[in-house]
Amino acid sequence: MSWEQQGFGQGSGQGHGPGPDQRDGYGQGYGHGPGQQYSHEYGQPPSYPHAYDGYDGYGQQPYPQQPYPQQYGQQPYPQQPYPQQPHPQEYAQNAEYGQGVAVDQTAPLPAVDADPNADPNAAPNADADADPGPVRDPEAPTTAGTGTGTGTGTGKVTEEPPPRSKPAAPQRDRYFDTLRALALIRVVAYHTFGWAWAGMVFPSMGIMFGLAGTLMAKSLERPALKVVKSRFRRLLPPFWFWGVFVVLAMLIHDWMPGWEIVYWVVPLGDPPGNAWGEQAWEILWYLRTYLWFVLLSPLLLRLFRLAPVPVLALSLAPILVLTFVWAGPDNRVGTAMWDLSTYLFCWMLGFAHRDGVLQRMKPALVVVMSLAAIAFGGWYAFTHQAEFGTYDLDEDPLAQAFWSAGFVMLLMWAKAHFGIDFAWLTRFRRTNRIVTVFNARAVTIYLWHEIALILAVPLIDRFWDVPAFEKYLPLESQWFMFGVGWLLIALFVLVCGWVEDVAARKKPRLLP
């Protein structure tokens, strides 16, 4: 075993090794701290080429140059006494090398091997206030305090690089997450109660398109093709999984599909179906519109950034053209044109929010424009009830476009201007948890909520056969059906929500 492998060429204590003009590293460089020390009373080991010339670290006289007739460590060399000088440590005899080793008066420390990866040429740390460099893992082995160093006497304390930690997940915006959760709740409520005024209180679809536009603008910082493929990949598998049950149910109920069944693979047009399943598949217009916006977003974002404010204002022009100039073809293409034109302004508002356009606009101008759009949309809805049979915004595309435009603009501008983030929501554990689940399972909730409401009707009919249920439960109330519908939605989230995880290339979970 070599000299350095035994640890006798290694420093101790604070790691102060000899400088470039110090040859006596065994005195000063190794004599500090509770680690191992080397006394001059036994001469110099043969593995170190030079003799000590005149060092009197403890007051002793220089050692004479004497040959070593024997192998080192076989017999102890004659010892010359030290002058009486106080020293805090005792000396123990090293049986193998016949060398004096400093031993702590209290208790010996276990020997720790030197780090083989240590840099022998690195300079010691002299400035305690300087940047300590990488922070060492507290569980990793260390050489500090045990006197280990390198064979050159530098006494360097080795520092292991910290383990690579996973990048922190980006913090979600609780303001947008809450708006999305409220939008989904309003959609379910509207399909349960049929309130015509619900869209005016909270225009859910305009808000959802606005939020999607913001996220799309952020995602397009990456290559456009990659973003589009990612959006399709995340949306289509949940749609296919849901579509299998709907298509099979319609086939059982005498549906005879044609070539249009390809829209059940990629819903860029309205998927076909029969009247029996219409309540289930009529909601797919949102998925179709969303996919078209995803495809058009690279071009729309480029146009928007050429002249943000003029392009934003002109995004209301298509719905005006379709309403007053040309209604478009009466087929799937025409239907898609109407829906894209209705919510184009909301999608572009997402771009404006992401690029900070709304924040740079004068508050008075934003408020006036928003209120003017809301006023026009409301006026048009109420003055054209005879034409559409109701003032429901979902039946009036022009009123929906302007009302949603003004409403979503106020929400987006308030977010940017006041810095609203709803961070306080995290203090309410249950509410925060519900918002998290709603956002992680938004596609599942939207696709399955109509089927849940459909199944709630025959389920409640069975409750009438139970006398206790008939007496104590409000089986005739729509609110009761609303509650049963949400219980079934929760069941679908547990049973079918994992498909969203698979589509997002995540580990499937019952609840996120």
Image: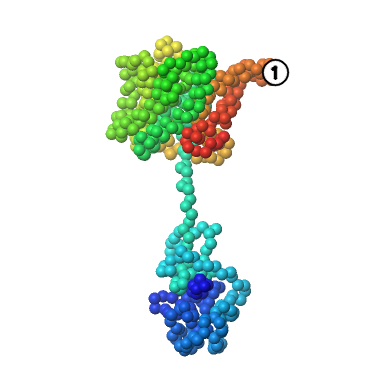
Crowding around mark 1 (Cα neighbors within 10 Å: few <14, some 14 to 19, many 20+) is few
What residue lies at 65% left-to-right and 17% top-to-bottom? 462
Judging from the image, the colouring scheme is rainbow
Between residue 261 and residue 385, name the one nearer to us. 261
Residue 96, horizontal then vertical, whole percent? 57, 78
Q: Position of residue 116 (x, y in %)?
A: 48, 65
Q: Is residue 435 visible?
A: no
Q: Quadrant of the C terminus?
A: top right
On screen, residue 249 versus residue 414, left or right, reads: right
Q: Nearer the viewer, residue 178 or 29?
A: 29
Can the viewer see residue 233?
Answer: yes
Kindly identify the amino acid type of the residue bearing the numbered disc 1: Val
Q: Residue at x 49, y 59 (%)?
A: 136
Residue drawn at the location 31% of the way across and 15% of the way down? 326
Secondary structure at badge 1 equals loop
Furthest residue toward front:
70
Relative to 145, is 175 above or below? above
Note whether 315 is above or below 129 in the view shown. above
- Image-based side of 204 in relation to 297, left or right: right
- 52 left or right of 111 in image: left
Residue at image mark 1: 466
**Residue 456's spot in the image, x, y percent?**
59, 20
Total residue callouts = 1
- Residue 243, given in percent of the width and then of the height, sits at 49, 23
Farthest residue, direction top = 386
Residue furthest left as drawn: 306
